[in-house]
Amino acid sequence: MKSKDNRIYLLYPPISKFERYSSAIGSAGGEQIPLGVYYLSSYLKKNGFDVKVTDAEAQKLRVIDIINEIKLFAPSYIGISSTTVAFHRALEVAREIKAVFPNIKLILGGPHISSNYKHAMSFKEFDYGVIKEGEYTIVELLEALANGRNLEEVKGIVYRNEQGDVIMTASREYIQNLDLLPFPDYDQISDIRLYTPPPSNYRSLPVINMITSRGCPNQCTFCDNNIFGKKYRQRSAENIFEEIKYLRKKYKVQEIAFVDDTFLIDKRRIYRLFGLLDKENISIHWSCSSRINNTDYDFLKFLKSKGCWYIAFGIESGDEDVLKVIKKNISLDAAHQVIGWCKELKIKTKGFFIIGHPTETIETINKTIQVACKLPLDDIVVTINTPIPGTQQYAEISKYGTIDETNWAEFNYWRPVFVPYGLTKEILLKKHKEIYRRFYLRPRIILRYFTSFFTKGGFRRFLSVFKASFFIIKK
């Protein structure tokens, strides 16, 4: 590799909380480490590249700040990772970069280009695109560029040929052995305290989000699996154990938020992981997400004994017929049972719900509101159904309603870009606020939040909840 081609700047673009959530409720949202760019950084370094990572969202950087960083680092390549909702910001930054540094090559990766590469590459600011998992692809792309190889031989990319046509190469196989990847490049994080979950989602600081698997084997029609696909792959218990040890030693991490969609899917791996931690006398608080049907009472009891204090469950709807349409493959009776077990064991729970599904009506939304309030949940997150390109739902959406694709910045799960037949945007927005009001403005929920203000980190919790309260009470 020539030295002048050895330097790459990785950017997570700037986007405000209001843009991401379209309301004041974003003030209560936390900041999670964008693990994707930090995995890329560590893998690039492993292969001899000089890398700098900037998370402009967490650091609240302006475009001019990013330009100044690029001047100092002087890279030959810039990689930008972007979701659909942040794409307008990625494009804004890309235009400024090209205006100041016309010879720097820009590589776009992340969910938006993986789901909608024709739209993303319609903007000439992006020279190349990386589709799906990026570690192996970006290294091979940079080596091909440095050595003058035919780009058509590089799997998993899009580029323009000499005639200006956008070419998509053959799809790259998913990484099967995730243990071969180095841990995320935590050394690139300027201040670990930049990253804190929402106010009710942590017990001890510092807390770090960790992912231990890729791919989801479930069939939910709305799920955006454009990056990691449906084939489930997981890191070994030993590999996770080593990362936790590293984080404890290097950053004094007290809590882990496992952000896998299905962290509890393999019970044997969980038992093995906590057996290893026990041998080293490592005790941590931790939280995770799980499907309703991946748990039972004895397993939950074990999790509680090993530091689990919070589990988020995807419930999505309070109507059994809607659950069948979206292929959620859970029952509401099972949800009541599992969340009841968690309450008995003093494991706090969050329910994820969506309104505006295909076939949704006012009656089915009201059922969702009733179920959310009836279940003994401690928290809820309610989003508005957003069909993402590449999902099964997006391919079929014209059968169920109308979709507005004029502004990708509104594809943030908080704006009604899709409206089922028989409903309106106004109804969806009204019901969205109603479910939050009816859930959170209840005595037991208010009391729980109030008492949490007197625990460690309580003042930060208070500020977050105070800002978000405008969304909840506004009519």
Image: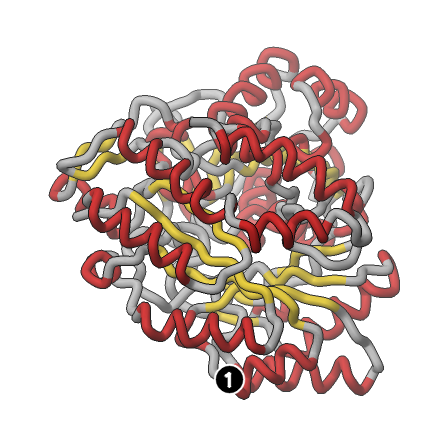
The N terminus, quarter of image: top right
Which residue is located at x 19 percent, y 44 percent? 361
For residue 78, above or below residue 275:
above
For residue 151, above or below residue 232:
above
Q: Is residue 216 visible?
A: yes
Callout 1 secondary element: helix
For disc 1, the neighbor class at 10 Å (few under 14, some 14 to 19, many from 20) is some
Q: Quadrant of residue 411?
A: top left
Look at mark 1 in the image and give the residue it sits on: 297
Which residue is located at x 62 percent, y 84 percent? 302
Q: Quadrant of residue 303?
A: bottom right
Total marks placed: 1
For residue 48, above or below residue 340:
above
Residue 356 picture location, percent across and down: 27, 42
Residue 100 picture location, percent across and down: 65, 12
Q: Look at the image and name its color scheme.
A: secondary structure
Question: Residue extending furthest front?
Answer: 443
Which residue is located at x 44 percent, y 54 percent? 352
Q: Quadrant of residue 346?
A: bottom right
Amino acid type for the residue under numbered disc 1: Tyr
In this view, the residue in front, 125 or 450, is: 450
Residue 44 picture location, percent across and down: 68, 49
Which residue is located at x 57 percent, y 59 percent? 259
In this view, the residue in front, 199 or 39, is: 199
Q: Is residue 389 visible?
A: no
Q: Is residue 212 left or right of residue 290?
A: right
The C terminus, quarter of image: top left
Residue 101 picture location, percent across and down: 64, 17
In this view, the residue in front, 106 or 324, is: 324
